[in-house]
Amino acid sequence: MAEVFEVLDAAETLGSPVWVAGGWGVDVLVGRQTREHRDLDLALDARFEDLLVGRLETLGYRVETDQRPARVELAAPGRRWVDLHPVVFDDAGEGRQADLHGGFFVYPREAFASGHLAGRRIPCLSARQQRIFRRGYPLRPVDYLDLAELERLVG
């Protein structure tokens, strides 16, 4: 969990808005770590992407998978991975993230929420948005675990 906070702190020092997604995003909504995680998924304001990549590189992360503008994944030896999802916002606060096929994912304003982890308030994607993002690909066992946690949250 310390590495999650290190990455969040790095984004905060840059003034970069980020929202935790994926498995850690579920944990933030639930308020505790529910399982082991391979990576930390972060939706971020695309205007800060290069700055955050540079900051993470100073912490020992290196770009491992570059599928920009859709995503960029960084890894640090012996540590977790960080998967950045740059989101471009319009004047109304709705976001769009490029996908790998020339389309895009929509982040409506209500997609953004917050939760807590280890007593810290953390911006994250809403339970509804987390469920939407688990559609359209074959679910892995960890996705079923995450969906069960989200179901307990929203009933």
Image (tube, rainbow, N blue to C red):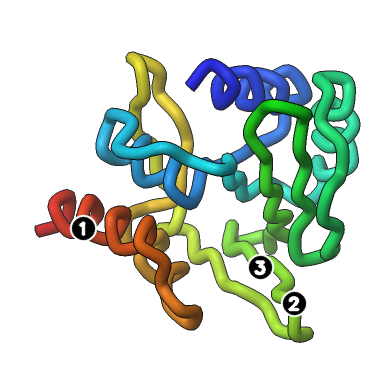
The residue labelled by disc 3 is: 96
Q: Where is residue 5 in the image (x, y as percent from the top left)?
A: 56, 20
Local crowd size for mark 1, using a 10 Å CA cut-off: few (<14), some (14–19), many (≥20): few
Which of discs 1 and 3 lies nearer the camera? The answer is 1
Q: Which of marks 3 and 2 is in front?
A: 2
Q: Find residue 153 and report its horizontal and vertical position in percent.
A: 17, 50
Q: What residue appears at the point 62 percent right and 50 percent down from the top-left corner? A: 43
Q: How much space separates mark 1 and mark 3, taking CA atoms? A: 27 Å
Helix, strand or loop at label 1? It is: helix
Nearest to N terminus: mark 1 or mark 3: 3
Amino acid type at circle 3 is Arg
Q: Can you say whether 50 is above or below 120 in the image?
A: below
User: Judging from the image, what secondary structure is the residue with disc 3 in?
Assistant: strand
Side of 112 where 148 appears, left or right: left
The dot on residue 100 is 2
Considering every residue shown, the one lying at the far left of the view is 155
Nearest the camera: 87 or 77? 77
Q: Residue 115 carries which label?
A: none
Name the image quarter holding residue 51.
top right
Measured as percent of width and height from the top left, residue 105 is found at 60, 73
- Residue 131 higher or lower than 23, as above or below: below
Q: Mark 1 points at which residue?
A: 148
Quadrant hosting residue 66? bottom right
> Residue at the location (58% across, 42% down)?
39
Residue shown at the point (75%, 59%) measured from the top left = 71
